Image: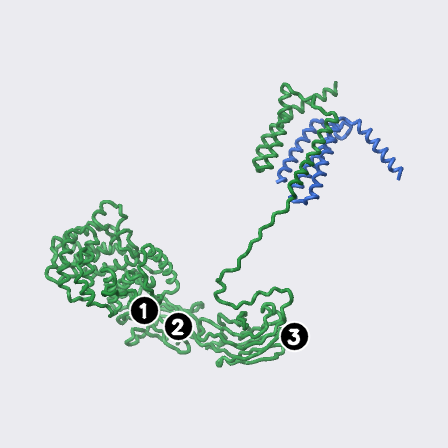
Chain colours: A blue, B green
Amino acid sequence: MGSTITDAQALVTALRSAYASTLIKLKIIDLYVVFSLATVLVQVIYMSLVGSFPFNAFLSGILSCIGSAVLAVCLRMQVNKENKEFKDLPPERAFADFVLCNLVLHLVIMNFLG
Amino acid sequence: MANTAPSASPPVVAYLRWLLLGWLLAAVSQMVTASTVLQPLSDGDKEAIAGYFVADADGFYGSLQETYHAVKALEILERSDVESQKICEAVVKSSPISVEDAFYVVKITEVLQCPQGAEVAKVVVPILQADVVNANSLLELHYSVGALATIKGWSSNSVVHKDALSDVFTLLKELARPDGTWHYSKSDSESSVKAAGLFPPFSFPTTAIVLHLFWQSQNVCMIACIGSVKTAAIKLFGNLESHGQGVFYFSESKDETSQGGGALAATWAVLRGSAALAAVLPVNLKVEKEKVFGIANFLLRTGLALSPTEAFYQLDSLSVLEDYRPAVPIIVQPSSILSLNSNNNLEVAVTTVLGKPVPQVEVALVSAHHIGADSPPVWSSQNFNYIEDSGKYGFDFLSAISGLGKYKLRLEVKPKEHSSYTSGGLVTSSVTVVSAITVSNVQLAVLDSDSGIPDFSAVLDFEKQEKTSLSANHLQKLRLSFELTSPSGSSFKPQQVFLKLVHETHVEHLYLVKSSGKGFELTLDFLGLVEKLQYLSGTYSVVLIVGDETMENSFVWTLASLDLDLPEAPEGTALPPTVPVEVNARFAPKPEIAHIFRQPEKRPPILLSNVFLGLTLLPLIGFFVGLRYLGANIKLFPTTGLLGVAAFSFHGAIASILLLYFLFWLKLDLFTTLKVLGFLALLTLLPGHSILSYLADLSTKQKTS
């Protein structure tokens, strides 16, 4: 029992120090993802309190947040210089894709919101 | 025609007449398709029409015109309850001022054959003579000349001068129109503002009278004048309108000064006028016989007249048709039902339109077919025999008939040589041959459901209309079987064969009895019918209903009274209330349906929603705080030059798209949004491309450098 706690503590410290070395750009994107997911959480708590009527509004709300989060993760993957997969992809291009996809997502969201 | 007693109806308003005419013609066309046999005015109808004319205290029937109508109509109906003496005295004492009153005074005197003719003439002649000279409309002329011609000979000073007559004739020729109709007055012939006052009828009696007077004074104009009048008359009959199926009539004139009355009045006027003309002309007025018969069709099929005036028009027209010189329509009525049992002859009655007898004619049966069977005609080209002193013609039709049913007859009536009688061509009618059907071998039995062994059975006698009583429970069946035989020996299949079960609370159930083999059979299994019978136990009467149009003795026969024992209704079944079946209950208002609208969904309290709205915005604030904490900045944001413009417009365009989305959520529809979005996308694309390519170049330069 005690060893696991100390192991967990060690793990967290290691993660923290590793994370500190990431670029600011990536940290911004991470923050954006956290923000989206926090919004989802708030919406789910609300839904559990008052029931799921109107269901389409609920769905569009959480889809918007989760969709944004997913797109942000994709952007982070493409912008990260250490990622060998997207070596040839200029980050500006990734950002443009991110903007476009977000706009399309939000159009769909607005339509579904009703 | 309808045989209803009339109520003392007030005069019909003019516009109602149009409605009535439309309805009448619709009804007529339906009636005509239903039966092609025309019927003369029956005694019942004559009684009904006579009831319209109710005399008031001084013997009159209203105004002078109405009195004349009443008196003439009652004369045609051969009624003797007219107080002629009273009316004559009153008429003589009345001092007519207008030429119309004078005309009716003279006419009443003529119809009632008042002895005070000379006095009447003395009073009336000055008015009439003055009007003849000063008349400038057809109606006035009609009154004055008509009255003068009637009272010729009543007194010595009723002679009209030759010059006045020739003036009258010139006026008539002026008012004539090429298509046989006439202008109403001289002022009309200049301008056609009054839509062509069609007043054909009044010119004819006038012309006839004028011709008659000319005849007396041996005027030379006669030969030429006659020709033009004859052509005008024949052209007038070209205006005859038809409503199809052989009904012809004249339609109402469009002049507002016309006396109203619609098609009946117009038809009456033409008939009266042409009859007067035909009486005076030396040569025959040629009118097609079918058209005359069509007019008779119209007069007899319009149904009962609705007012005294209409009654007068109808009666007077029919009396004109009784001896109309161009053609006299005769009505042919064959009998419509023949019974094989009584074996009577097919009889045909031939009368005038008012039901009076007609001199002997030749009646022949052209053909008789069985309707529904594609067989050759049963009879063809047979002559009827005249039955003495009855005006009827008989023929032994049934000698070649063996089967029941409807037969279509085509009769031809040939009047004697050179006579003007017309039956309107071939007369088609149908005759139904009926007979009494024998009912035999009627067996009613109650069977055990499983084994089929009858627990009770009875054979009932039809002649005595026997009734039996039996009892059954839900485990048994009821069986009925019987045979129907037609006189030819074959089994008969009627149109209606039903078995009815009537509960003591008047709840009825009908069942169809199907034919099987030589007869009819029905088995009612009570086990399956328990629910349909609504679990009602008790006494039922079992009634057999058999009927057909060729069956003389269709019957409703109570076969038995059945004591039926059904199980109790199970718990929870909502039985419909067994109300007594009242015929009119079907038409009573139904129970009202209270509509329950969908309840709106429960929404959370507004406070809670607002709290959570705040909570949702909290992460956003957290995001910005986090950004600040991370040290993110926009120091590299280009603010000057083209780049600045591009950057600002890029972000501005994205912001505007988001604003568009917000508006889309609030009030826009998708199509507008997409249109604007397309435009804004373009706006985003161009600066976006430029700024991002600049940044890309910047980073590659940084890499290489």
Query: Are the residues tagged 1 and 3 within 8 Å (C-beta)?
Result: no
Question: On the rendered image, what quadrant is the N terminus of chain A found in?
Answer: top right
Q: Which residue is mark 3?
A: B450
Is residue B544 rendered to the left or right of residue A5?
left
Between marks 2 and 3, how big is the CA–CA gap?
Answer: 50 Å
Please state the horizontal and vertical placement of residue B403, each as a whole percent of the image.
Answer: 44, 73
Tell me if A80 is positioned left or right of A61 in this view: right
Residue at disc 1, secondary structure: loop
B297 with respect to A1 (left or right): left
What residue is at 59 percent from the left and 74 percent from the top? B564
Amino acid type of the residue that numbered disc 3 sits on in the rendered structure: Asp
Compared to A70, does B591 lie above or below? Answer: below
Residue B91, quarter of picture: bottom left
Asked whether, in this view, residue B144 is left or right of residue B702, the answer is left
Q: Which mark, by number, is residue B337?
A: 2
Helix, strand or loop at mark 3: loop
Amino acid on which the number 2 mark rests in the picture: Ile
How packed is label 1: few (under 14 Cα within 10 Å), some, or many (20 or more)? some
Residue A103: quadrant of the picture = top right
Tell which circle, 1 or 2, labels the residue nearer the N-terminal end: 1
Within-10-Å neighbours for mark 2: few <14, some 14–19, many 20+: some
The answer to which of marks 2 and 3 sits earlier in the sequence is 2
Q: Are marks 2 and 3 in contact (CB under 8 Å)?
A: no
Q: Mark 2 — on which chain does it sit?
A: B
Residue B42 got which mark?
1
* CB contact under 8 Å: marks 1 and 2: no
Chain letter of the residue beneath label 3 in the structure image: B
Q: Are marks 1 and 3 on the same chain?
A: yes
